[in-house]
Image: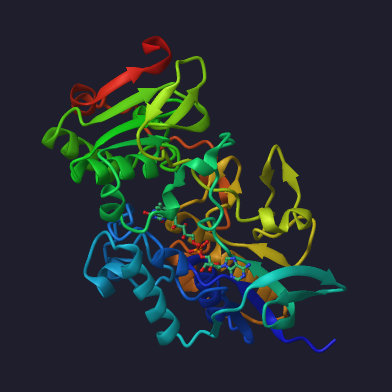
Amino acid sequence: MKLSHNVLIVGAGPAGLGCALALQAAGVEDVVVVDEKGIGASFEAWPEQMTLLTPSFHSNNFGFADLNAISPETSPADFLNTQHPTGKDYALYLRAIVKHYELSVEPNVRVTSLRRVRDAFEVQTSKGLRTSRFVIWAVGEFARPDLGGIEGADFGLHNSRVRDWEQLALTGDVFTLIGGYESGIDAAIQLMQLGKKVHLLSRGHPWDSDDPDPSRALSPRTRDRLKNALLEAPGTIHFYKNAEVLAIRPVRSGFELDVRDGKPFHSPTPPILCTGFRSAIEPLRDLWEWKKGSPIFSEAADESTLTPGLFYSGPSLQHRGMLFCFIYKYRARFGVIAREIAGRLGIDIGDGLDLWKQRGFLLDDLKCCSDCQCAVEPEQDHQLNQHAEVIEYAVAA
Ligand SMILES: Cc1cc2nc3c(=O)[nH]c(=O)nc-3n(C[C@H](O)[C@H](O)[C@H](O)COP(=O)(O)OP(=O)(O)OC[C@H]3O[C@@H](n4cnc5c(N)ncnc54)[C@H](O)[C@@H]3O)c2cc1C
């Protein structure tokens, strides 16, 4: 069969473009990136006010890559002159990368299905059939909100659907948030700073978590922002811990939320669900092996263990119980995927990926992902506890 491409990458976000750059450095030709919308579309859809929480800092000359860079030689901080880019800023950086490195990106091409035929893939797209020797699935999670299994979730609003907190704030004075991780706390701060009263209900109390994995605990930046916001206007966020919302119902005066082991909670405005996202692998469920609800990735190169030649890059990646959900984590595997594909195509990489290895974009020793000892016992967050009003929901009920 005459193939359209060596490698077809689905998704022109940081993961797809990062893989395209690594493949270029490895000398792989005939690589195309397709995207149903365009370059950095998920970042374009972020609320106006939201910024990356991982800080950007240009230190390449000292051998460290900017935490938000998708290649060893670029820096969003240097390019955008900011430490915490907005979504629109970051999309600008991605577009500049595509232009500078002359990557082949086709917008407005939606992949609807793919299947392996002998040693290649037939990929159905909104613009017709493509064939490719390898496929890298890099569609991200942003388009797949997790509604947390809450009955009547459609009466609420998932935080990924908010385009502008200022506009939303015009719709009421009191808001209820469900979920207390990064998105929930960000939403709480945004609304509080707009003079709104916020009730934040959470299954546990993640704002107090001391998990060593930054994917499972609040980032220092978010803690700082929260502390500052509370100091400016203490008491305008009410935290309800152990308040697991089971259902949302419209009532005459707004919405009623059923809370496990607690009395119903009333919200005058549609509750905002900050309940996370579903795996990017879900659309390819049958092509992937799953264990306990999570997809399995080969440790050799993040490939499907069921479908050879199908790779994944992005925030749904997991190895040894660790989540690779930030850019600085999953980019560590761009070089690994590129090296594997180049090897199978019989390409001599030479020193093409040396810099990628030196700067942490080719991490092939996953020992770092297990037995994480990086956290010492954290200091108690006195300031947060002093200024926040935390209510034990079940007891209060
Ligand atoms: C609220 C929030 C805050 C975050 N903050 C940070 C942070 O501070 N630091 C950090 O490192 N990470 C952060 N992240 C995570 C970061 O945004 C993701 O890791 C990143 O967007 C994932 O990149 P990606 O390339 O996998 O997916 P995306 O950026 O979502 O790109 C996927 C692309 O695939 C396209 N696509 C989807 N389906 C198809 C299809 N069927 N056919 C063709 N194209 C398709 C989409 O249009 C999209 O352009 C945050 C995420 C969220 C939601």
Q: Is residue 310 above or below residue 199?
A: below
Q: Which quadrant of the view contains residue 180?
A: top left
Q: Which quadrant of the view contains residue 207?
A: top left
Q: Is residue 56 left or right of residue 228?
A: right
Quarter of the image with the N terminus is bottom right
At which x and y percent is residue 233? 14, 34
* Picture residue at 53% right of the left edge, 46% below the top: 323
At which x and y percent is residue 197? 24, 34
What's the colour scheme?
rainbow
At which x and y percent is residue 156? 46, 42
Q: Is residue 387 above or below residue 217?
A: above
Quick one: which residue is furthest to the front in this view?
Answer: 252
Of residues 201 and 140, which is closer to you in this image?
201
Quarter of the image with the C terminus is top left
* Picture residue at 55% right of the left edge, 76% below the top: 20
* Picture residue at 53% right of the left edge, 49% below the top: 145
* Picture residue at 18% right of the left edge, 39% below the top: 229
Of residues 117 and 371, which is closer to you in this image?
117
At which x and y percent is residue 312? 63, 61
